[in-house]
């Protein structure tokens, strides 16, 4: 499993940049990654992302941790594309499997795009504190408030989501390890046993997550946090 | 339930939409087979209402796509629409279906949402996202055959989880008069 969502303490232009600008930049770069089709275009975007990692001072290890966690999945994607994408001009055949340059190229493109998006996402969370991210979402969505959209609630939801990911990831890992110790690896079971194992696993994960949600909402309300779309002055602010 | 709590539940379920697929992706092709992202969306709708379910349905796949690259960008729009429908419909059905039995209410809402989400996904793919390249056979295969294990998992886990949350006192009971 990957570790995402962790803020890395450092002093860099990316850490100091406005959260709304970072969010907009992230979306623009993800669009670039999606639109890049040729190896040259992908290499240029990769160079840009590498430059951002260098500028951010979060370290290559921290920036690549989430991508490293995906290695087996990405390897499977590459192999499946290489063997199943096409049957024309096969370099090697084995029954229904055909290794082709077109498949290899397609697999490499998918893997490269996924890696770039993962690194960009990691950079955002490594250089932006959750509260700053909430402020960034709030600023970015502010124009939509005039249309009556609940910007404050959206910003709160994004902030809480990003903030909870590392916590829930840690708790899920602990619960999975505890279950592995008690019952063995889930992956080695048959389908029905797996379903039963996942029921046993998911119930405590959800109960624990909702307990945290309950505690957080009680704490927020106890401090007077209210979301009222009516008057701008009251929106999502803590009452004095 | 207060509005703040509904939003926090929606956000926590969206976080689970990011966390659960990470666990399931250790199994090959697990995303399409086990459908781990569907479970928090439906639970959000069932316990916190249609708006919270819809918020989870949007935030879960979008933030997961941005932060982890999964689902990949081409799959993101149809998947977001599908999950939004799951959250919205499960919340609406949970609000209006009142049979007098909690489990029956929840199963009706769950199955209704599962069907509605798949229908919306199929219609959107056929008309907007893959016009001309999407067939009824492909829809049946993707919605029911490939994801059969995920459907079984959803039917097996979602209702017990919601009942457990009610018993733990974390969400208000559907029939307070019976609980009292």
Image (spheres, grey):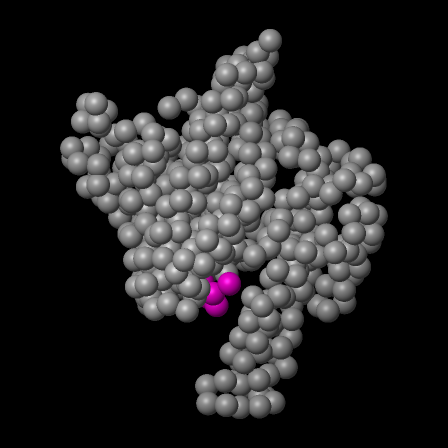
Q: Which residues are magenta?
A: B26-30
- The location of residue B142, given as percent across then percent down, is 37, 63
Question: Is B29 included in the stretch rendered in magenta?
Answer: yes
- The location of residue B176, given as percent across then percent down, is 23, 24
B137 and B100: which one is in front?
B100
B37 and A197: which one is in front?
A197
Is residue B165 visible to us here?
A: yes
Quarter of the picture holding the N terminus of chain A:
bottom right
Q: Is residue A108 above or below residue B55?
A: below
A194 and B54: which one is in front?
A194
Q: Is residue A82 above or below residue A12?
A: below
Provide the major secondary structure of the magenta segment. loop
In percent of the image, x 54 and y 16: which residue is there? A223
Q: In this view, which residue lies farthest toward the left?
A: B100
- The location of residue B92, given as percent across then percent down, is 31, 35
In percent of the image, x 51 and y 78: which residue is there? A84
Q: In the figure, is residue A136 to the left or right of B23? A: right
- Total marks shown come to 0
In percent of the image, x 57 and y 51: which residue is there? B65
């Amino acid at each position: 499993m990957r570790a995402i969502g962790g803020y890395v303490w450092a002093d860099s232009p990316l850490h100091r940049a406005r959260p709304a600008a970072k969010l907009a930049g992230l979306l623009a770069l993800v669009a670039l990654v999606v639109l890049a089709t040729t190896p040259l275009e992908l290499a240029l975007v990769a160079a840009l992302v590498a430059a951002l990692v260098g500028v951010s001072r979060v370290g290559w290890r921290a920036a690549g941790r989430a991508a490293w966690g995906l290695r087996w999945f990405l390897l499977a994607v590459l192999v499946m594309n290489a063997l199943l994408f096409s049957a024309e001009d096969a370099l090697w055949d084995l029954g229904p499997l055909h290794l082709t340059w077109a498949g290899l190229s397609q697999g490499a493109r998918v893997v490269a795009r996924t890696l770039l998006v993962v690194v960009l996402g990691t950079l955002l969370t490594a250089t932006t504190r959750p509260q700053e991210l909430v402020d960034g979402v709030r600023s970015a969505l502010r124009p939509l408030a005039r249309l009556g959209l609940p910007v404050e609630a959206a910003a709160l939801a994004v902030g809480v989501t990003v903030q909870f990911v590392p916590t829930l990831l840690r708790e899920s890992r602990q619960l999975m390890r505890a279950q592995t110790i008690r019952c063995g690896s889930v992956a080695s079971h048959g389908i029905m046993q797996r379903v039963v194992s996942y029921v046993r696993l998911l119930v405590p994960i959800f109960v624990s997550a909702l307990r945290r949600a309950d505690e957080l909402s009680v704490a927020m309300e106890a401090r007077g946090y209210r979301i009222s779309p009516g008057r701008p002055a009251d929106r999502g602010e803590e009452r004095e | 339930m207060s509005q703040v709590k509904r939003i926090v539940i929606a956000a926590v379920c969206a976080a689970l939409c990011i966390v659960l697929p990470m666990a399931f992706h250790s199994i090959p092709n697990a995303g399409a087979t086990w459908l781990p992202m569907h479970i928090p969306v439906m639970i959000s709708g069932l316990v916190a209402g249609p708006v919270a379910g819809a918020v989870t349905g949007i935030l879960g796949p979008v933030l997961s796509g941005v932060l982890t690259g999964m689902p990949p960008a081409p799959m993101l729009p149809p998947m977001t629409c599908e999950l939004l429908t799951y959250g919205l419909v499960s919340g609406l059905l949970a609000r209006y279906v009142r049979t007098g039995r909690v489990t029956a209410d929840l199963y009706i809402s769950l199955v209704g949402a599962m069907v509605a989400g798949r229908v919306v996904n199929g219609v959107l793919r056929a008309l907007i996202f893959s016009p001309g390249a999407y067939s009824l056979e492909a829809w049946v295969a993707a919605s029911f055959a490939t994801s059969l294990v995920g459907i079984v998992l959803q039917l097996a886990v979602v209702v017990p989880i919601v009942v457990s949350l009610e018993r733990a006192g974390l969400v208000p009971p559907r029939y307070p008069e019976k609980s009292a």
